[in-house]
Image (cartoon, rainbow, N blue to C red):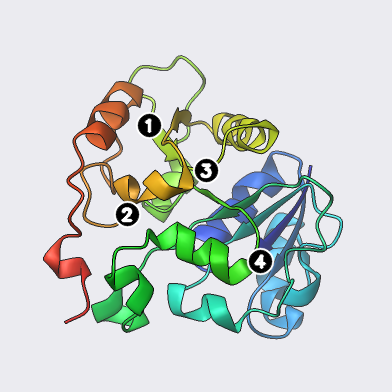
Amino acid sequence: MRIGIIGAGHIGGSLTRRLAALGHDVKVANSRDPETLAELAAETGATPVWAADAATDADLVIVSIPQRCVPDLAPGIVAKARDGAPVIETNNYYPRERDGRIDAIEDGLAESVWVSQQLGVPVYKVFNGIFWKHLLTQGAPKGAEKRIALPIAGAPGAGKDTVFALVDELGFDPVDGGSLEESWRQQPGTPVYGTDLDAAGVTKALAETPSERPEQFRAA
């Protein structure tokens, strides 16, 4: 697939490395000049581009940037992807450590619904709760014992099927996390977040997630 990645931090950079190694045609961008990604490009074979060009003709787009930076993306930045291309977002809202207060999220809107509103397109939430080093190194063959599972929230259909297949290709069991409106079940501080559970464990954790956002993940 042709994959555009906006964001080259821990998760975006790890996905660039893994997906390029799997043979995908990866374009990657950060908030600066593409030349700042020369080392990552040399390592992986990915093509560094301006953020405005990352999604152009992509079969799948990944947005992996700090939550507070999403509104700063150029309007329509993911609209250059191919028709029907799913858009993955890996973001997390950390109001105290990084992002500051986002009123809509504090008032109860799921983080990924807010991201979807900012981007103006439907999104799928995945990769937000796995430690980046584990994303790089802990993928396992399908059927492996204790294979790490990752929840995927978003609308059903061909796009979600594509995201499921990508997660499996990366070496993780995809688990349906429900609609995007239910993506609060995998936000920071929830039972599934950062726990490396298997598929049964992820399913159980999602079902047992309390609806109240943990205090430490609310704005002070």
Residue named by callout 1: 148
Name the secondary structure under disc 3.
Answer: loop
At 28% from the left edge and 72% from the top edge, which residue is drawn? 106
Residue at image position (25%, 32%) is 207
Residue on which disc 4 sits: 40
Viewer-side label of 2, 3: 3
User: Is residue 50 visible in the rendered structure shown here?
Assistant: no
How far is the residue under mark 3 from the one under mark 1? 20 Å
Asked if 194 appears above or below 41 in the picture, the reply is: above
Mark positioned earlier in the residue sequence (4 or 3)? 4
Q: Please, what is the three-letter code of the amino acid marked with disc 1?
A: Ile
Q: Residue furthest left?
A: 215
Q: CA distance from mark 2 to mark 1?
A: 17 Å
Q: CA distance from mark 4 to mark 2?
A: 29 Å
The foreground one among 42 and 169 is: 169
Mark 4 or 2, nearer chain start: 4
What crowding class fits label 3: few (fewer than 14 Cα within 10 Å), some (14-19), or many (20 or more)?
A: many
Is residue 44 depicted above or below 154 in this figure?
Answer: below
Query: Along the horizontal axis of the image, is 16 left or right of 50?
Result: left
Q: CA distance from mark 1 to mark 4?
A: 26 Å
Query: Which residue does the numbered mark 3 point to in the structure image?
Result: 154
Front position among marks 4 and 3: 3
For the residue marked with disc 2, what is the amino acid? Gln
The three-letter code of the residue at mark 3 reads Gly
- Residue 187's mark? 2
